[in-house]
């Protein structure tokens, strides 16, 4: 379950694009893209720190809500908390404050990547713009590397780097953006 938390604390999500630009995207354009994203859903593939691969469905409702559905677990971000629910266990969900995760940077009501000390890396890797971000007040919470393509701007993947040196990668499939997603989907026991 720890690998799930490492990935989820990052964050976040949004469709794929097939065209990449030869130049890195300005941070202001990326912030506008994330702020315009209200809902999205689709498939993802996760490469865990130990080399194992997990797949599942992701649901995003900004601000503040995200759901990752794995075969054996569900991870929810809602009401300022991240909950990890093991479907095979009768135990209570593991709970962590959302603000102590890099995911909080993406699910914020207003994403401003130009904020002092938030972005600690902004490069172009030959196919996509890579933005490395962290909570400027709490860099000890780890960081997230977000990979964006352009024309149109799209988030394709992210990498969570935790303070113990662990790394988890989430690769997003084609996501459906817009539309209605029920708030109940972000509850512990949606019916």
Image (cartoon, rainbow, N blue to C red):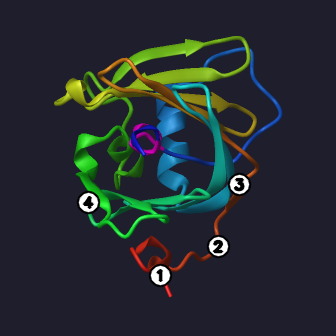
In the displayed structure, would residue 181 be above or below residue 5? below
Q: Does residue 136 appear in this view?
A: no
Which residue is identified by label 1? 190
Ranked by sequence position, the earlier of labels 1 and 3 is 3
Could you give the CA–CA distance between mark 3 and mark 2, rounded to whole angstroms? 12 Å
Dot 3 and dot 2 residues touching (CB under 8 Å): no
Which residue is identified by label 4? 80
Near mark 4 (Cα within 10 A), the count class, few <14, some 14-19 or many ≥20, is: some
Which residue is identified by label 3? 175
Ranked by sequence position, the earlier of labels 1 and 2 is 2
Relative horizontal placement of residue 80, taking residue 156 as reference (left or right) = left
Q: Does residue 78 appear in this view?
A: yes
Foreground pick, 153 / 99 = 99
Ranked by sequence position, the earlier of labels 4 and 1 is 4
Dot 4 and dot 1 residues touching (CB under 8 Å): no
Foreground pick, 166 / 79 = 166
Could you give the CA–CA distance between mark 4 and mark 2, rounded to whole angstroms? 23 Å
Is the magenta region chiefly helix, strand or loop? Answer: helix
Ranked by sequence position, the earlier of labels 3 and 4 is 4
Percent from the top left, x then y, of residue 170? 59, 37
Percent from the top left, x then y, of residue 83? 34, 59
């Amino acid at each position: 379950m720890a690998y799930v938390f490492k990935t989820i604390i990052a964050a976040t999500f949004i469709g794929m694009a097939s065209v990449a630009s030869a130049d890195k995207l300005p941070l202001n354009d990326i912030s506008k893209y994330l702020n315009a994203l209200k809902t999205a859903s689709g498939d993802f593939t996760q490469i865990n720190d130990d080399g194992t691969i997990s797949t599942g469905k992701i649901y995003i409702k900004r601000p503040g809500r995200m759901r990752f559905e794995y075969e054996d677990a569900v991870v929810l971000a809602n009401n300022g908390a991240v909950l990890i629910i093991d479907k095979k266990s009768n135990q209570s969900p593991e709970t962590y404050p959302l603000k102590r995760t890099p995911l909080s940077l993406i699910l914020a009501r207003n994403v401003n990547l130009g904020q002092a000390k938030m972005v600690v890396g902004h490069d172009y890797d030959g196919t996509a713009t890579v933005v490395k971000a962290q909570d400027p007040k709490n860099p000890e919470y780890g960081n997230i590397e977000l990979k964006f393509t352009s024309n149109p701007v799209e988030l394709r993947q992210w990498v969570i780097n935790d303070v113990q040196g662990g790394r988890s990668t989430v690769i997003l499939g084609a996501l459906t953006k817009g539309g209605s997603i029920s708030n109940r989907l972000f509850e512990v026991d949606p019916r």
